[in-house]
Amino acid sequence: MTPVRATALLTLALALPAAAPVGFTGVWKLNLQKSRMRDGQPVPFNKSHIISIVQKGTIIYWREQRITSEDILLSNCAEIGIGGQESVLFGFDDGRVSNNSRISIVIDGKRLEQKFRGTTNLGKTFQGIRKLLLADDGKSMSAVFEGNRFGELVAWTEVWDRF
């Protein structure tokens, strides 16, 4: 191995642990009692919402499952690099699998910014950004969500509790 290559590998090895986020791995449940629309009303879209996050180096495995206010089970998953590049967000709704959506994640310390956009199997378009902040004790995350949900501009705050 040449000295230049050895130096490059050592630099990469030292950079990876610093780039790998700490603390987001886990199962998170949306606290519906503490999450609110911008006008202070409860978030009306979901009866239940769970996010599972697994971090491995600079990759995040993201899985979301929610039950809508209409009692429809929706689920999606993705393998995402944490550097902001877009990845396919596979969705499972209306009894079909879709790959019409994209997701990206950027992590900076205790902050995770998630951007997503796409179209459901029913042809409804959406896009949004969720900015999560991990609590110092690691037991919860707070978030601000803003987006376009099927043609309607929406914004709310979220509180996520670690399962």
Image (cartoon, rainbow, N blue to C red):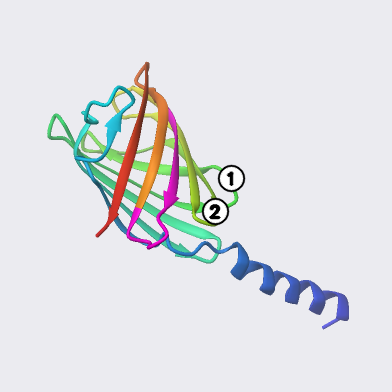
Disc 2 secondary structure class: strand
Disc 1 secondary structure class: loop
Report which residue position mark 2 lands on.
81
Residue 158 horizontal/vertical position (percent) = 32, 40
Region in magenta: 127-140
Q: Are marks 2 and 1 in contact (CB under 8 Å)?
A: yes
Q: Amino acid at mark 1?
A: Gln
- Name, please, the residue furthest toward the left: 71
Describe residue 2's horizontal placement relative to residue 136 as left or right.
right
For image coordinates 60% across by 70% down, the residue present is 17
Q: Quadrant of the N terminus?
A: bottom right
For image coordinates 86% across by 81% down, the residue present is 2
Q: Nearer the viewer, residue 145 or 127?
A: 145
For image coordinates 37% across by 45% down, the residue present is 142
User: Which class describes the residues within 10 Å of circle 1: few (<14), some (14-19), or many (20+)?
Assistant: few
Q: Amino acid at mark 2?
A: Gly
Residue 56 horizontal/vertical position (percent) = 48, 66
Residue 61 horizontal/vertical position (percent) = 42, 57
